[in-house]
Structures are given as C-alpha cells and as structure tokens.
Amino acid sequence: QVQFEESGGGLVQPGGSLTLSCTSTGFAFAHYAMAWHRQAPGKERELVAAISERPFRTNYVDSAKSRFTISRDDPKRTVYLRMNSLKPDDTAVYYCNRGFRYAMDSWGKGTLVTVSS
C-alpha cells in the first residue's frame, strides 16, 4: 500500500523559510519521480515542484522558481522541499506524491504552511 507522510509545516512570517519532508512507503522509491503539490484555501491543488529519479531533473511552477528547492534522499525514501522568501500566497496544505507531472496515488494528510505576520 502506497503511503505518504508529510511534515515540517507551520506558521512563518513573510520572508521566512521552511523545509518540508515527505517519507514514502509501499513502492520502489528510487525508481519514481516525486513531486510536491499544494492546495490553498478555495483553490485547486497545483503541482509546485518535481524531481525525477536519477539523474534528478527538477521542475518548478513559475511562482516557486528561485525560491523553492526540491531534493530527495533515496536511501531514506524521503523527498524535501526547501522554501525561502515565503509569501502569504504560499499559504496552503502541501502534499507529496509520485509522478513528475501528475499525481499517481491517493493523497496523504499533507502539512499546513501558513505565511502570516
């Protein structure tokens, strides 16, 4: 059974930073691309950043470029999202999932990021 456990969210002031983590089980992690998605209140879920299996190509939504960095640790079955220069518009529940462009599995519980002064 494929499962995702996201963590690292919280309340942060505008301009601050957070690092999210997502640990996965139930599939051969190193063989799949992984991605972070987010859903803001009243909006549809959107893909924010993706990282392929080796050689670890990455892709970002325009609003995340130069501010967010996605990375992965295959032995730990974990994908990370480092978020810098956070803005109120980044407030959302963040989820991870398999797939470089589209989510392949059911969603986990996500982790809430709130950017507010």
Image (cartoon, grey):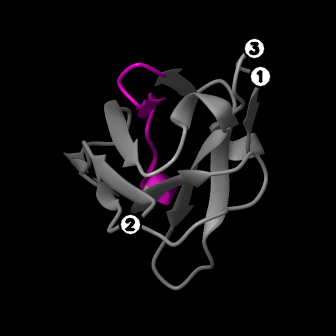
- Horizontally, residue 87 falls left or right of residue 111, namely right
The magenta segment is 74-90
Labelled disc at residue 68: none
| Closer-to-camera residue (95/90) | 95
- Measuring from the top left, give residue 59's x and y in whole percent: 76, 34
Mark 3 falls on what kind of element? loop
Mark 1 falls on what kind of element? loop
Q: Quadrant of residue 57?
A: top right
Q: Residue at x 76, y 42 (%)?
A: 62
Q: Which residue is denoted by mark 1 in the rendering?
A: 57
Q: Amino acid at mark 1?
A: Arg
Mark 3 in CB contact with mark 1 (< 8 angstroms): yes
Q: Which residue is denoted by mark 2 in the rendering?
A: 108
Query: Closer to the observer: label 3 or label 1?
Result: 3
Verify whether residue 112 appears in magenta. no
- Horizontally, residue 52 falls left or right of residue 95, namely right
Eyeballing the image, is 110 above or below 49? below
Residue that extends furthest to the top in the rendered view of this protein: 55
Q: Residue at x 45, y 60 (%)?
A: 2
Q: Which residue is denoted by mark 3 in the rendering?
A: 55
Separation of marks 3 and 1 at Cα, in angstroms: 6 Å
Eyeballing the image, is 63 above or below 30? below
Give the class, few, some or many, for how many residues have Cα within 10 Å of label 2's Cα (few <14, many ≥20): some
- Measuring from the top left, give residue 11's x and y in whole percent: 20, 51
Separation of marks 2 and 3 at Cα, in angstroms: 26 Å
Q: Amino acid at mark 3?
A: Pro
Q: Residue at x 66, y 38 (%)?
A: 32
